[in-house]
Amino acid sequence: MKVTRCLITAFFLAVRGADEVIALKAARIFDGKSNAPVQNGVVIVQGDKIVDAGSNLPIPSSARVIDLGDGTLCPGFMDAHTHLTSDFSGDYNQHRLKEVDLNVSEQAIIATSHALATVEAGFTTVRDLGSRFVGSHEFVDVALRNSINKGVIIGPRMLVATKGIGSTGGHFDPTSGFRDFLFGREADYTDGIADGPDEIRKAVRFEVKNGADVIKAAVSGGVLSLADEVDTPQLTPAEMAALVDESHRLRKRVAVHCHGDDAAHEAIEAGVDSIEHGSFMKPETLTLMKKKGTFLTPTLMATEWIMGKLENYPPALQAKAKAAAAARSDMFRNAVKMGVRISFGTDAAVYPHGQNAKEFKLMVDLGMKPIDALKSATANDAELLGIAQKVGTLEKGKLADVIAVPGDPAADITATERVSFVMKEGKVIRQGPPAVQKIKNTASPNFAAPAD
Ligand SMILES: [Zn+2]
C-alpha cells in the first residue's frame, strides 16, 4: 500500500514536473532572426517546448520565474564544426603519442568532459565533424551522442559525422605520417578512406549504417596532417559527385573540409552543403557559393589558436598554418561583403573545448555585424543542420534551448563568452558557475580538461 502511494506520488510529481511552467525573464531578448535584441525579454517554457517568447509578455501566475536580470535571452548557440571526442590543443607530437597510447574507452570517458564544457558554454547543439582513433573502429561520437540523448551524460545535442571520408594519404588518412604498415594494413572505407566513386559511395553507406547524421569529407589538404599540402585537391570531381549524390539520396547533408580554391570550386559545383575553413577561396569561388547558396563555416578559432601556439607544431605544419592564416582573413572579409551564407563553426578540439564563443569576436573583427554573427550561430546553423523546424530561434513550439548572456551582445559581442544560464529542452543545465570548472580544479596534470 505504502509502495503504491509512493508510486502514485512519484507519478503526480513527474506529471507536475512535465507540466510546470517556467518563465525566463531578462532585460533583453534576441530571438535568433531579428535585426536587434528587444527590451524586456520573456520566454515561457512548458515541458521541453517554448510556449511563447517575446517582449513584455504577461507571465502566467502559476509560472516559476527565473529572473536573469540585466542580460539577454538568446536561442542556445550552435557550433557547426566540433570534434568533441578529441583534444589536440597541446603539443602536436604528444597528442599523436597519446592517441596510440590511451585506449579508446579512456578517450571516450575524457570526451564526456568536452561535451559538458561545450553545453555549459551555451552551445546546446553541435555538428561534430569527424571522430577517429588510428587502428580502432570504435564510433565514439555516436556513443557520445546517444548517451547525451538518453540523459546518461550532460552535453549538447549532437549531429555526428563518424569517421569522415577522404583519399589515401590525404588529410583524413589516420595512418599518414606513421611508418608504412605500422598498423598492419592500409586504411580502407571502414576508416573512411576511399578512392574512386564506387568506394566513396560504399564509405558513405558504411558511415550512415553506423550512425552518421551528416557526411564529412576532406576534399583538399589540411593544416594538421603530415603527408599532404594544405591546398591541393584530394578528391576528383567524379568522386565529389558520387559523395554528394549518395549522401543526398540518403537524406544526409555534406560538409567538406577544404582550404584550397580549386577543390572548393569543384566541391561547390558538385553541390556540397557547406565548405569548412575555405582559407584560400578567391572572390570568383565565393560568387559561385553565393549563387548556389552554399554555406561557409569559417572556423577562425582554429587558425587563431594554432598561430598563437606555433611552437607546439612541427615545422612543416607551421608553414601550412602560416599560409592558411595569411589567406583566410581576406577570404572571410570578402565572403561577408559579398553576402555568402555564413554558418558558425569553430573546429573545437584544435583549441580547448568550451571556448567556442571566442569565434564571435573574430568574426566581428573581420567585418561581420555583431547581430549577423549571432544569427550565424542560431538561425543560420539551424538551417544548415536541417533542424530549423525544432531549434535555432525563440518561437512558440520550438524546443526550449535558451541561454542568457550578460548585457547586450549586439553592443559587446564578447558577452557571448560569459554565458550565465543554459537551458536545453526545458531543463536548466547551468545557472551560475559551470560544473566543468570543478572537474578541472581536481584533475590530474595529464587530464585533457578544458582550460581558459
Ligand atoms: Zn575539423
Image (cartoon, rainbow, N blue to C red):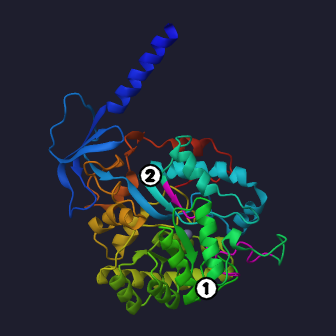
Residue 157 at least partly seen:
yes
Q: Is residue 373 above or below residue 228?
A: above
Q: Position of residue 233 (x, y in %)?
A: 58, 88
* Front position in the image: 254 or 332: 254
As helix, strand or loop, the secondary structure at mark 2 comes to loop
Q: Position of residue 65 (x, y in %)?
A: 26, 33
Q: Dot 1: few (<14), some (14–19), or many (≥20) neighbours within 10 Å?
A: many
Give left or right: position of 269 versus 147: left
Give left or right: position of 9 versus 201: left
- For the record, the magenta segment spans 158-178
Real-space Cα separation, disc 1 to disc 2, in angstroms: 35 Å
Q: Position of residue 287 (x, y in %)?
A: 35, 88
Q: Residue at x 63, y 64 (%)?
A: 88
Tell me which amino acid carries mark 2. Answer: Ala
Q: Is residue 74 above or below residue 232?
A: above
Q: Residue at x 64, y 73 (%)?
A: 202
* Front position in the image: 165 or 348: 165
Label 2 sits on residue: 121
Q: Splitting the image into four quadrants, where does ligand 1 fall? A: bottom right
Give left or right: position of 38 versus 258: left
Q: Position of residue 85 (x, y in %)?
A: 61, 57
| Label at residue 354 | none
Mark closer to the chain start, 1 or 2: 2
